[in-house]
Image (tube, grey):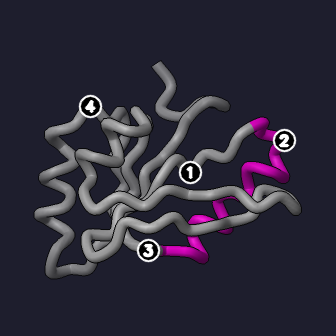
Amino acid sequence: MPLFTKETTAVIYGMQAAAIQRMLDFDWMCGRKVPSVAAAVNPSSSEITTAFFGAKPVPIPVYKTTREAYEKTKADVFINFASFRSGFDTTDEALDLPFKTLVVI
């Protein structure tokens, strides 16, 4: 079973606007039909952020918890940009969810 497919979606932990935009740029250049970033997690805010898929702005929902982000999106991948201080706890939380792939940056 492949880790990534054309339908793979990801939850990004941390407000990494540049990383999210780069992922969407790569998606668009590769000819994906929909963006691979399903949501972001920011414990201090749950607002919607906007990125671009080609020239089209797309809303990226932001949730306060990884569990909520997974439950709302059913994403396959969790990409953790948490700081050294919280990296273990946020990864441990993600391990309790049915993500296929976890990436810790």
* Viewer-nearest residue: 4 or 7: 7
Q: Residues within 10 Å of mark 2 (few under 14, many from 20)?
A: few
Q: Is 85 on the left-hand or right-hand side of 35? A: left
Residue projecting furthest to the right: 55
Q: Position of residue 102 (x, y in %)?
A: 33, 47
What is the CA distance from the residue labelled 4 to the residue labelled 3? 22 Å
Please tell me whether mark 1 sits on a helix, a strand or a loop: strand
Q: Of marks 2 and 4, which one's residue comes earlier in the chain?
A: 2
**Dot 2 amino acid type:** Gly
SS assignment for the magenta stretch, majority? helix
Please tell me whether mark 2 sits on a helix, a strand or a loop: loop
Badges 4 and 3: C-beta atoms under 8 Å apart?
no
What is the CA distance from the residue labelled 2 to the residue labelled 4? 27 Å
Residue 20 falls inside the magenta stretch: yes
In this rendering, the count of numbered labels is: 4
Q: Name the residue: 84% across, 52% down.
A: 29
**Dot 4 amino acid type:** Pro
* Viewer-nearest residue: 45 or 34: 45
What is the CA distance from the residue labelled 3 to the residue labelled 1? 12 Å
**Dot 1 amino acid type:** Val
Q: Which residue is mark 3?
A: 15
Q: Residues within 10 Å of mark 3 (few under 14, many from 20)?
A: some
Q: Of marks 4 and 3, which one's residue comes earlier in the chain?
A: 3
Q: Of marks 1 and 4, which one's residue comes earlier in the chain?
A: 1
Q: Is 29 on the left-hand or right-hand side of 91? A: right
Q: Position of residue 47 (x, y in %)?
A: 44, 67
Range of magenta residues: 16-33
Please tell me whether mark 3 sits on a helix, a strand or a loop: loop
Which tag is nearer the camera, tag 1 or tag 2? 1
